[in-house]
Amino acid sequence: MPMTNEDSFFFMPVKEVCHRAVVTCSPDISLIEMARVMMVNNISGIVVAADEKPVGIVSLRDLRNLIAEAAETIVSLKVRDVMKTALITIHSSDYLFKAIFLMAKHNIHRLIVIDEFNMLSGVITDADLMRIQTSSPLYLVQEIESAGSIEQLRLLGQKMTGMVRYALKTNADTQSLIQLIAHFNDALVQRLIYILDRYHNVRLPAGAAYLSLGSEGRHEQTLRTDQDSAMVYRDDLSHDDIAAVRRFAGEISAALENIGVPLCPGNMMASNPQWCHSLSEWKELIEAWIFHPYPEAMVHFGVFQDLRVMHGDISFEAELREYICECARCNSIFFPGMARNIVRFKTPLGVFGRLQVEKKGEHRGKLDVKKRGLFALTRGVSLIALEAGFMGGTTWFKLERLHHLQVISDHDLEIILNAFTFLLQMRLRTQMNALLSGNSVDNFVDPAELTDRERDLLREAFKGVETLLDILNCRYQLDLLAQ
């Protein structure tokens, strides 16, 4: 077992910990035979495998319940008759933080580990994790799950910042680090919703949903991402239930601010009545944004299109996404119009690749990596994905799927992926440095404070942004449109 410390534990691959020999059985043996296998091996659960792939799992709890409810049928049953097939798996190359979250999310004590070919590789348990590290931030997710007040969540949010600082010191890969932040943010929000319900009598009625939008909707938050959210509810919701939806929206926005999540400067939040509508009202707005894409409509659509249901009726997510795709397909000028708005955000590359910085104001000598780079990448990739007929997921996921659909070439994929990853990493490191020095957190980077190597990589990243802008120009014939 490798030595671990707080800096490295979360980013150890599962395969470094998963050394336990996995005991399996066939789905076609009897329950009596299966129980004997479990007894001989002194195990509390057994993985059911067929052709070396996991197909189910049976626990002692399953057997106990079966004996209590249908003891007379046990002799005639086979394993496949009782095994659970909705398996919670993890890849051996995934990081331990993902294992921790999966166990906490599903309230389970073991995960089935599979390799890159989805073949059974082993089993990892919560005891394995506890045994190798008892003083790390491993317990943070458990602390979140047991928090009983908004103030406790605020303090845990500060702990999360410290954990990210440790992870940055280890040079953990940016995508995994962003996923980790997204996991913790989701856990904080879900616990906050529980606390509002349990201790403040604030809850969302049935037939409604709280939507995360923008970077949170894409699972791409950094340390200080503003609140971007909305509410949606059924058209037939009662007046009292609509009032409860609006109360929930106001309370959660205020509570998020209390635990350190800033309000959206543009007020694109659930607490704003303009972002709290019935399903049919949202569909009318979506149609207006797409068929009449004036500047403000483009901004609103750009934030809304990355929606996902954080809490409530999950069916709204698919219905809204499907409606967006349908409306976009019906308007031939929508995609060129959105693309033209995106390419207006030029990169800060001057003659001979020189980095152009702000000439005056509080950000003099700095450049905005979000406005001058990440904005074009996230919006541009989302737009092309929408035209290809799909929504949702991270920018990394969308790029990989567009590549799979042969919309983006091998060469362009690598350039754009590298650009997006580096700019997000630069944004995250800049925000962390600002927090540690007690300064306000923003998206501005001072090239003078970077090493020569970092400046070179920053230039290459902006060239990657220009590659995407060129794709948008060519794909939607924006030069002809301008004429």
Image (cartoon, helix red, strand yellow):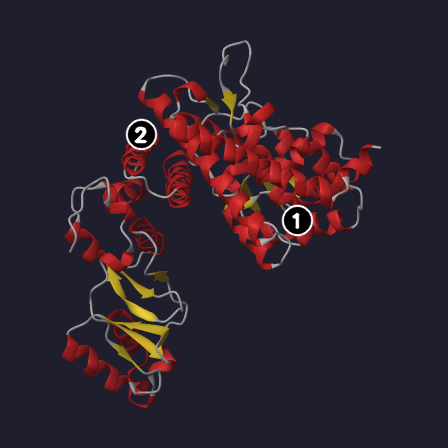
Quarter of the view holding residue 88: bottom left
Any part of residue 4 in sight:
yes
Which mark, by number, is residue 37?
A: none
| Image marks 1 and 2: residues in contact by CB distance under 8 Å | no
* Residue under label 1: 386
Q: Which residue is mark 2?
A: 158
Res 352 → quadrant: top right
Residue 120 point in image, percent of width and height: 33, 71
Q: Nearer the viewer, residue 127 or 146?
A: 127
Please state which amino acid type lies under the numbered disc 1: Leu
Which of discs 1 and 2 lies nearer the camera? The answer is 1
Find the residue positioned furthest to the front: 352
Foreground: 246 or 356?
A: 356
**Farthest right residue in view:** 483
**Picture layout, residue 471 above or below residue 106:** above
Give, as a three-letter code, the residue at label 2.
Answer: Gln
Is any part of residue 245 visible from this angle? Answer: no
Out of 443 and 163, give the one closest to the viewer.
Answer: 443
Residue at image x 22%, y 81%?
35
**Quarter occupied by the N terminus:** bottom left
- Residue 89 position, x and y percent, is 36, 63
In the displayed structure image, the side of residue 35 where residue 207 appears, left or right? right
**Considering the numbered disc 1 on the image, is that residue within a helix, a strand or a loop?**
helix
- Residue at horizontal 42%, vertical 22%? 441
The mark tally for this picture is 2
Q: Residues within 10 Å of mark 1 (few under 14, many from 20)?
A: many
